[in-house]
Image (cartoon, rainbow, N blue to C red):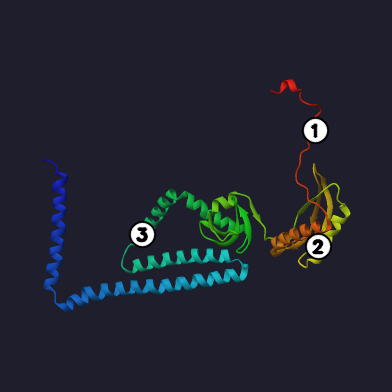
Amino acid sequence: MSQPTQTETQATQNIDVIATTEKIFNQLDSMSFDAILREWIIPYGTKVFLAIAIFVVGKWLAKGISQLLSKAVLASTKDEMLQSFVRSISYFLLLLIVVIASLSQLGINTSSLVALIGAAGLAIGLSLQNSLQNFAAGVMLLIFKPFKKGDFIETSGISGTVTQMGLVVLELRTGDNKTVLVPNSNVFSSTITNYSANETRRVDFIFDISYDDDIAQAKEIIREILEKDDRVLKEPKPVIAVSTLASSSVQIIARPWVNTPNYYAVYWQVTENVKIAFDKAGISIPFNQLDVNLSGSVPESSVK
């Protein structure tokens, strides 16, 4: 006896579906409206209504609980980036539970759904390895906390103020008000310089004067300018000393301490004030120069 072909099998299945559909419609035609209402509309309508209610209320509760958790984290750690991370993760997990509960109310086998979600998650994870690396790096950054929101940092060759750290990228605002997104994996794997980690910073100045100028007078001018600036801290005391006898100048260093927010303002203002004071005192800031001494003249016979 020959086996049925694939076309015959598909035709048989189509006939079965059509026959089943006709059977259901015939059953509905033979039923009264009260029976349809009692056996179909009320039971299934109730399930759909409860599923929608579970989803709406559950979504509202998930949002509220995630916000409460984020506030608790902020109150205990004072870390706004960790707060944002906890809020996002907790809301996603709670919303996933709400969706599964809603589908369960509709009579869908949730155990199969959970297995399907797991398989889909594995497939997505394999295809989004870089994103998962960024996510893992973001978790490590939140654990070790090398910086916080509002800190001015330098990482991956980029300097800027930390405005937000997402699940996969770090958002920086540069000094010229550009927004730069740096992948978390790049941040975690590279050197991080946090200029805002400490309350105070040392400002390093180098002033060049001519060999003919008075070193003591130059040092006194620098000292007076630093003492008149209220933003310069009294302790530790500024260091003013000759550092290098360069090829065309004497280099004097000045190293005052300031509060971190005043770093650049002091750097720019003191540099300007020293230049003006040096000009008034007749102290020159020499240019780089090269002296060439010729030991003999070139014979005229060699010049044509």
Residue at disc 1, secondary structure: loop
Three-letter code, disc 3:
Leu
Please give left or right for residue 43 compared with residue 268 in the image.
left
**Which residue is painted at 61% across and 64% down in the image?**
150
Q: CA distance from mark 1 to mark 3?
A: 89 Å
Residue that mark 1 sits on: 293
Residue 152: % across, % down: 63, 60
| Mark 1 or 3, closer to the camera | 1
Residue 13: % across, % down: 16, 53
Is 286 placed above or below 217 here? Answer: above
Mark 3 crowd level (few <14, some 14–19, many ≥20, 10 Å Cα): some
Residue at disc 2, secondary structure: helix
**Which residue is painted at 39% across and 53% down in the image?**
119
Label 2 or label 3, whichever comes before in sequence order? 3
Q: Would residue 235 be seen by someone viewing this image from the given angle? A: no
Q: CA distance from mark 1 to mark 2?
A: 40 Å
Q: Are marks 2 and 3 in contact (CB under 8 Å)?
A: no
**Which residue is painted at 17% across and 76% down in the image?**
35
Residue that mark 3 sits on: 113
Three-letter code, disc 1:
Asn
Residue that mark 2 sits on: 225
| Mark 1 or 2, closer to the camera | 1
| Mark 2 or 3, closer to the camera | 2
Residue 105: % across, % down: 33, 69
